[in-house]
Image: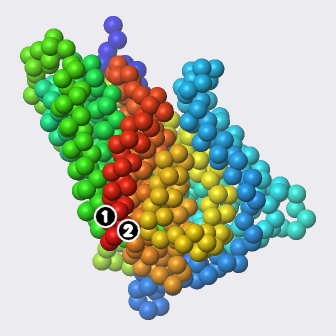
Amino acid sequence: MTTHAETPLSSERSKMLWAILAMLALYGTSFAVGLPQGWTVAALGGHHAEEPAVDGTADAHKGANDVEHAADAHHAGSPPPLWTVAPFVLLLGAIATFPLIHATEHWWEHNRNRFIVAAGLGALTLAYYAFLHHEPVEAHWPGHAIVAAHDGSVFQTEFVATIFGNALLQEYIPFIVLLFSLYTIAGGIRITGDLEATPTTNATVMLIGGLLASLIGTTGAAMLLVRPLLETNHQRKHVAHTVVFFIFIVCNCGGCLLPIGDPPLFLGYLQGVDFFWTLNLWPEWLFVNGMLLAVYWSMDQFYHHPRETVRDIERDVTRLHRLRVSGLKVNGLLLVGVVIAVAMLDPSKAFPGTDWHPWLYFREAVQLALVAMSLAIGPRESRLANRFTYDAIVEVAALFVGIFVCMQPALQILKANGTHLVERFDMGPGKFFWATGTLSSFLDNAPTYLVFFQTAQDPELAGGPTAGVPEPLLAAISLGAVMMGAMTYIGNGPNFMVKAIAEKSGVKMPSFFGYMGYSVLILLPILGLMDWIFILRP
């Protein structure tokens, strides 16, 4: 007889715990030889992380460096040719179409195959920089630099190292560690119960999720509430529309108030945007989520719920169980710890009340330590009852390795031509909103945000709370990336996760284009009205 400790899920937990401990040990070893300290000094432009700047303020020094770096960017060479974005386009096309093609749909279900495609296309991008690119490249990790080609060299090793550092060491590692931390810790919280599956009940769950999304991330909120939502509605036949609105609100539109809420805003925070600046977006947050909840309640109240059979309604009403929460005492505190770590341990900012800058990757090490605590001391029963696996986060991790590498030529092209594009198309906040949002619908919202963020940067504003981006433009870019990430399944990582969990629970979810039918007919008009009220007429 198999004991509780020998179940596959328990074995998977043990392997992950040991893997995290190994990574923490590796970080500790690197710390002992001074690597994170040296990287932090380089990231601060040669200024020692534990010493005050010449004028007594490390942040002032950081602002001066930002201005210098923005000016140095003009010394970078010509950007790559347009055809170098082909691997990026091919990867995103694979994400959109492979699940729909009969010959590839089952092959694509394996994360190993997703990684093969993503890594293979990423390798093509790196091969371009290794053999064909000969112009100077701007480096961002660990510190800012302009890397020139070595004349006569066949293989440009420094270019490959620069692109690898920019894509994976600078952006991907903080991004995926944050998602992994929220996903894993939230997976240890079990909410059970079977409430009456009325429109009001479902809308209330979405409202709570929309509030939590900015506090514990769209990933954390979605993983926390999607299972109780599905359990509440398991007697109903018409559930797909409820999951779609859950994706709209909890996986996307609810997460725009803090950088912890959604990956694009976290990338902005990594670029220097003040942690609390996004709270300024509360009117847009309230309008969009309020409109979505009102539309959902009306649809479910007057169309979907009346279509349920009398038998199913009776089963739903007679099989009610009050809500019970397990695992919250430990994992709830650990989720708060992740939020605090993100807010307080940014290497580019001095720790509050001190001149000390947290060492590079110390923030990520703390997040992983919190995950290890969740796995070690959190209730195993809650995670097992959730049927928790790492499949969804592994899928995101496998695909984003390629996305972050393949998008580098696109970033360089747009950064080099950003000023020209803005002037040619007279891009004000409204056009930034729709340009960012349209690409975020199909190209994934995190890298798209970064592209337009860098396009809109003004060197004269460097060092401020918006990291050099005029405030109206930053608001438009942030809203477009976060909210229009809900337009397709591929717009944001949690969209994938919720769809997969719903289908495993027996819900027949819309196809890629079926989902877009909902987003085009419902979400898009609401966003258009928000643009007219808040962006075009601030």
Q: Which mark is residue 118?
A: none
Q: Quadrant of the N terminus?
A: top left
Task: Looking at this view, name the residue that lies furthest to the top.
Answer: 1
Q: Nearer the viewer, residue 317 or 323?
A: 317
Residue 385 in the image: state x and y as whole percent.
27, 24
Q: Quadrant of residue 224?
A: top left
Type of amino acid at the residue the image marks with label 1: Ile
Whether label 2 touches label 1, CB < 8 Å: yes
Q: Under tag 1, what secondary structure?
A: helix
Q: Nearer the viewer, residue 270 or 467?
A: 467
Q: Is residue 175 left or right of residue 91?
A: left
Circle 1 is placed at which residue position? 533
Q: Quadrant of the C terminus?
A: bottom left
Residue 242 in the image: state x and y as whole percent.
28, 32
Q: Is residue 332 above or below residue 416?
A: above
Q: Crowding at label 1, few (<14), some or many (≥20) Cα neighbours within 10 Å?
A: few
Type of amino acid at the residue the image marks with label 2: Leu
Q: Under tag 2, what secondary structure?
A: loop
Q: Is residue 215 above or below residue 463?
A: above
Circle 2 is placed at which residue position? 536
Which residue is drawn at the image coordinates 15% and 13% (left, top)? 310
Q: Is residue 451 left or right of residue 241?
A: right
Marks 2 and 1 sit apart, C-alpha to C-alpha, by: 7 Å
Q: Is residue 64 left or right of residue 501?
A: right
Which residue is drawn at the image coordinates 88% and 68% (left, top)? 151
Q: Nearer the viewer, residue 231 or 303?
A: 303
Q: Determine if residue 360 is in view.
A: no
Task: Looking at this view, name the residue that lies furthest to the right.
Answer: 152
Which residue is drawn at the image coordinates 30% and 45% (left, top)? 249
